[in-house]
Image (spheres, coloured by chain):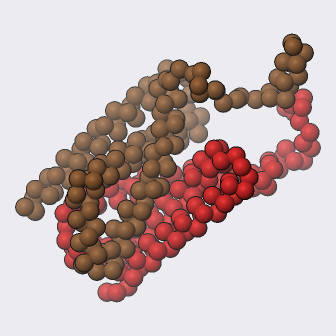
Chain colours: A red, B brown
Amino acid sequence: MRTRNSIRTDLARVRGLGSAQSGTHEWWVQRVTAVALVPLGVWFVASVISLAGADHATVVDWMSMPVTAVLLVLLLAVTFRHAQLGLRVVIEDYVHNEAAKIASLLAVNAILALLAAGSIFAVLNLAFRG
Amino acid sequence: MSSDRSAMRGITNRPLSPHLQVYKPQLTSVMSITHRATGVALAVGTLLLVWWIAAAAIGPDAFAQVQAFMGSWFGLLLLFGWSVALFYHLGNGIRHLFWDAGYGYNIENAYRSGWAVVAATAVLTVLAWIAGLVVLGGQG
């Protein structure tokens, strides 16, 4: 039903993209990454517990196993995407100055991208070192 | 005055956020903001995760530094906080996914699932640390 005060056209409502032109895409990606993080997170916590107090060689052996490397890369990629979307919403809610908002969004994106690329590179480096 | 009010109601004909200053804290609202806080904390906590992985790739000396830090009282405190935040955000995140799917919206169920998440956070945190200590003990 069209609300009394809506000035949006019927076509805009059907497309459902809103003012950002991306519709519910980011909201949906937040949920998809959340679902993926349930098994990945449980696997990672169980692995870390089993590695409690382990020395460098043991941890490197574990990290460079193919299954571990693949799951770690997935965990890192999905975690940082989920964090990016979550922090974005928090910043958009609390930072009201437009310049400060855009600056903090860019800064957070840059930091998360560096952390994601750096940590994934480290895992692949270990895995391919043989 | 009343005409002003109905005009305003026309513009804001949608749910509005409560004014927190005059709002009595409830389990549901406290858990909602805690979900956000733990999410931000976990995002910051990824620094620890990245440091751990990078140090493993760099070499034994760098890795020994991480191990020493994680084993210090401050490192253990951070790890404990990280585990509480993770289990809370995991449990409450699943609660949110059920809401997204359209289940558990009525007040009674929202409180029931809320307390379940609080209990699960406590139980999982304690179990994880007991398991960690058992693994540590097994090596000694």
Quadrant for the C terminus of chain A in the image? bottom left
Q: Position of residue B126 (x, y in %)?
A: 24, 42
Residue at point 50% right, 73% down? Answer: A117
Q: Position of residue A27 (x, y in %)?
A: 64, 49
- Residue A68: which quarter of the image? bottom left
Would residue B10 be found to the left or right of residue B128 on screen? right
Q: Is residue B113 visible?
A: no
Using the image, determine if residue B29 lies above or below residue B132: above
Q: Position of residue B62 (x, y in %)?
A: 29, 75
Residue at point 48% right, 59% down? Answer: A79
Residue at point 49% right, 31% down? Answer: B30
Residue at point 38% right, 63% down? Answer: B49
- Near-viewer residue (A89 or A126): A89
Q: Is residue A86 visible?
A: yes
Using the image, determine if residue A86 lies above or below residue B15: below
Q: Given the current orientation, which residue lies at the most extreme left position?
A: B140
Q: Position of residue A71 (x, y in %)?
A: 40, 67
